[in-house]
Image (cartoon, rainbow, N blue to C red):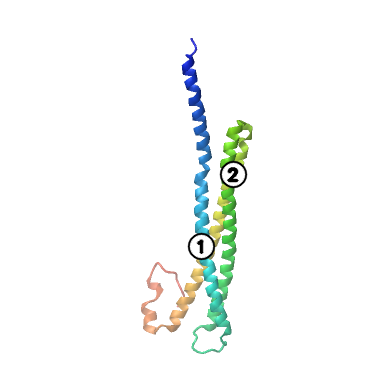
Amino acid sequence: MSPAPFFLRVRKEPMEALSSAVAVLTAMITPAVLISACGALILSTSTRLGRVVDRVRMLIDRFEELMKTPVDEEGVELFEERRVVIFNQLDNLTTRTRLLQKSMRVFYLALGVFVATSVAIGLVAAAGSPRHAWVAVVLGLSGACGLFYGSVLLISESRLAQAALNAEMDFIWKLGRTLAPPDLRQTRSPHFNPLTLRRKL
């Protein structure tokens, strides 16, 4: 079998080099999907953190006003229960703030690791040393573990948010039963709505 003509060999070599370059660029762009996911999680987490901080500042002002009010103040329904609910809400919001801050740190770290993964893929390809490919693999796995851990933290924070919302709605229902007329309490009871939580009469 005769060897391929010279001009075919010359044409084939640039095509192979181009294919290799495209493959390297494709591998470097692959972590961009996870980088985009980190950015979306950081944005949503920072938004939730800002709302929690605003809620804390509002509750602090309300709690200070109630603390300055005498205990035997007339005209304030469920006075002691109000103070207990606000204090518990502040305690819950403090825990949520710490979880959100920790998850943001984890997401920022994962973002940096994924960028380092992309750089490592390019360096390994440029150096032409496949034995160092494990560096990019380890970095990619580390970033994925960071994403998973941050998601677990957000799940814990959302459970606390749900518990705080349920406690606040319980107090609102109790306050409504105290202030509402008897006929309204009977006709507008949440027991008639199968989608609401069951509450004691």
Q: In this picture, is 57 found above or below 183? A: above
Front one among 29 and 62: 29
Q: How many marks?
A: 2
Point out residue 134 in the picture as x, y percentages from the top left corner: 62, 37
Q: Quadrant of the C terminus?
A: bottom left
Which of the two discs, 2 and 1, sits closer to the camera? 2
Above or below, 173 against 121 in this view is: below
The correct choice, above or below, for 175 with respect to 92 in the image is: below
The amino acid type found where label 1 is placed reads Arg
Which numbered tag is attached to residue 39?
none
The residue where tag 2 is placed is 116
Q: Residue at x 50, y 61 (%)?
A: 47
- Which residue occupies the extreme top position in the image? 1
Alpha carbon distance from label 2 to label 1: 28 Å
Residue 9 or 161: which is nearer the viewer? 9
- Which residue is the site of mark 1? 48
Label 1 environment density (alpha carbons within 10 Å; few <14, some 14–19, many ≥20): some
Q: Is residue 129 above or below residue 113?
A: above
Residue at x 59% of width, y 44% of height: 116
Q: Are marks 2 and 1 in contact (CB under 8 Å)?
A: no
Q: Quadrant of residue 61?
A: bottom right
Q: Residue at x 54, y 65 (%)?
A: 160
Label 1 residue SS: helix
> Residue 109: horizontal and vertical position, in percent?
60, 51
The amino acid type, in three-letter code, at marker 2 is Ala
Where residue 56 appears, x then y in whole percent?
A: 55, 71
Q: Residues within 10 Å of mark 2 (few under 14, many from 20)?
A: some
In depth, the one of 33 and 128 nearer the eye is: 128
Q: Tag 1 or tag 2, which sits nearer the N-term? A: 1
Query: In terms of image quadrants, where is residue 114?
Result: top right
Answer with the quarter of the image where residue 95 lies.
Answer: bottom right
Q: Percent from the top left, x then y, of residue 21?
A: 52, 32
